[in-house]
Image: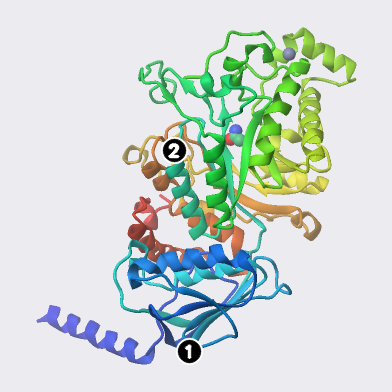
Amino acid sequence: MKKFYILFLIAMNGLLVASCNAGVNEVNIIPRPAALQVMPGSFSLTPKTVINVVAGTDELLPACRFFSALVERSLGIPLEITRGKARGKAINLTVDASLGEEAYTLIARKKSVDITAGSARGIFYAFQTLRQLLPAGVESGEAAPSISIQNVAIEDEPRLAYRGMMLDVARHFFPVEDVKTYIDMLALHKINRFHWHLTDDQGWRIEIKKYPRLTEIGSTRPETVIGKNTGNYDGIPHGGFYTREQIQEVVQYAADRFITVIPEIELPGHALAALAAYPELGCTGGPYNVATWWGVFNEVFCAGNEQTFAFLEGVLEEVIPLFPSEYIHIGGDECPKVRWKACRKCQARIKAEGLADEHELQSYFVQRMERFLNARGKKIIGWDEILEGGISKTATVMSWRGTKGGIEAAKLGNRVVMSPNSHAYFDYYQSKDTKNEPYAIGGFVPLSKVYSLDPTEGLDEQEASMIYGAQANLWTEYISDIRHVQYMTLPRMAALAEVAWTPQSLREYNDFLKRAIVLTNRYKSLGYNFATHLFNQDQ
Ligand code: ACM
Ligand code: ZN
């Protein structure tokens, strides 16, 4: 009897809510827009709806095609793309260069959806927002004769220009299809930089025609250590690399989603795979082997040898034309100095250049490569160790050992991307209950911790203006397949997206959590794996 009474109350309550909010459905968008108003009524998206370009060039086409392809499987046909004056039964697109490049407004009303944006990029983000107004089933092509879009008025613009995600394909290789899936995941979250960690001790993953041994020798290791350097090995060769054509394919795929690919070519450390291929570039001359276990290795590029610079310049000459990115990431992290200390050539360089020590030698190395890249129209970005021994005015610092290096760089007037391991290392555990988690490198970065990052915290206005962006990193020592990549990055990527996009004053964790739970329905429909236990964590 009591049970029925409660059910009756719930049913009545449901009716009451439905009648009070007639025609107003809950809207859950991640990252949270800068301004959002939900209005009664809806727009009906049908096979007859057109995407109508009111003002804009063909640069809009990738954004239009993306949205058309998204709804095509549900509606049965792609949406026609037209040009002309704003009209009804249409998604009208207007580029207005007086808006910020990534800014957009989106008004959905009964008659039409009207999007205005500063550029094609902004139009793409408006479409990603519109996407989150569609039922999750659209992502898996659930058939629908028409799709109802809640009426809304949105004004939106990102907080930070650089919103990045890194994938390490050196520790484990991921085929092109997986990389594209990763890029798809980024696009959904309005992430606009894909940092591709292409070289490391355990594998060289990019074809360089001038130095074929990099991939012949450097892309394969004979086996991989089991667990955390246990001394036991799996006996299974692991390898793979991307051809130039594959790199171009990925860069284009990302560009169609308004994502810039930043390649990382590690120097002067994390160089064992390259040294295995070209041992004359190391201080001792080798022989060297592609690393089969994890860590930081003493074998690094010799900074006293002119051949090293000729080699790296030859590599970069081939890398530069493949990537339209303003940046090349040159690594710079974790470069032990033991070999340099004992190397005749390195010591001669220190003397000849009037350097104080090996830290200044590293700085000489990085700044020399920077001059080479600057002369070819590229800027460098490097891990925060590039601050040690002195940094040029023009280098951008990626702060990974907490935010300390980033703060120091911002105070020096250098551009910064905040990527602290305390908040943005997605290879770290997401739960303290590690026994019930896939094996991970350590640490503890739950969803709430990611969300709590404020990239400009503690900086004055001038210093804060040097914070170019925020990024999360996925190192893959213990991650070898895309399902696991997804488990580690979703939904933490949603938190990172909001860190980088949403005005700080609008960020509230519980509000985010509610929307994140809704977003996981979309992940499900997309077939993405994700960490489901995260919604009642912090344990
Ligand atoms: C890093 O995690 N070594 C940048
Ligand atoms: Zn040397």
Q: Quadrant of the N terminus?
A: bottom left
Instruction: Say whether disc 1 or disc 2 marks the residue closer to the N-terminus.
Output: 1
Q: Is residue 301 visible?
A: yes
Q: Is residue 154 visible?
A: no
Q: Is residue 143 left or right of residue 473?
A: left
Residue linked to disc 2:
175
Q: How many marks?
A: 2
Q: Which residue does the image show at 81% across and 43% down from the upper left?
A: 394
Type of amino acid at the residue the image marks with label 1? Lys
Mark 1: few/some/many CA within 10 Å (<14, 14-19, 20+): some
Residue 471 in picture, x, y percent from top left: 59, 49
Residue 343 in picture, x, y percent from top left: 74, 9
Mark 2: few/some/many CA within 10 Å (<14, 14-19, 20+): some
Q: Which residue does the image show at 68% across and 15% down from the upper left?
A: 281
For the residues marked 1 and 2, what is the alpha-carbon distance in whole angstroms? 44 Å
Residue linked to disc 1:
111
Q: Is residue 428 above or below residue 104?
A: above
Q: Is residue 219 above or below residue 44?
A: above
The local secondary structure at tag 1 comes to: loop
Q: Which residue does the image show at 68% across and 19% down from the upper left?
A: 301
Label 1 within 8 A of ligand 1 by Cβ: no
Q: Is residue 330 above or below residue 398?
A: above
Type of amino acid at the residue the image marks with label 2? Pro
Image quadrant of ligand 1 equals top right
Residue 280 in picture, x, y percent from top left: 67, 11
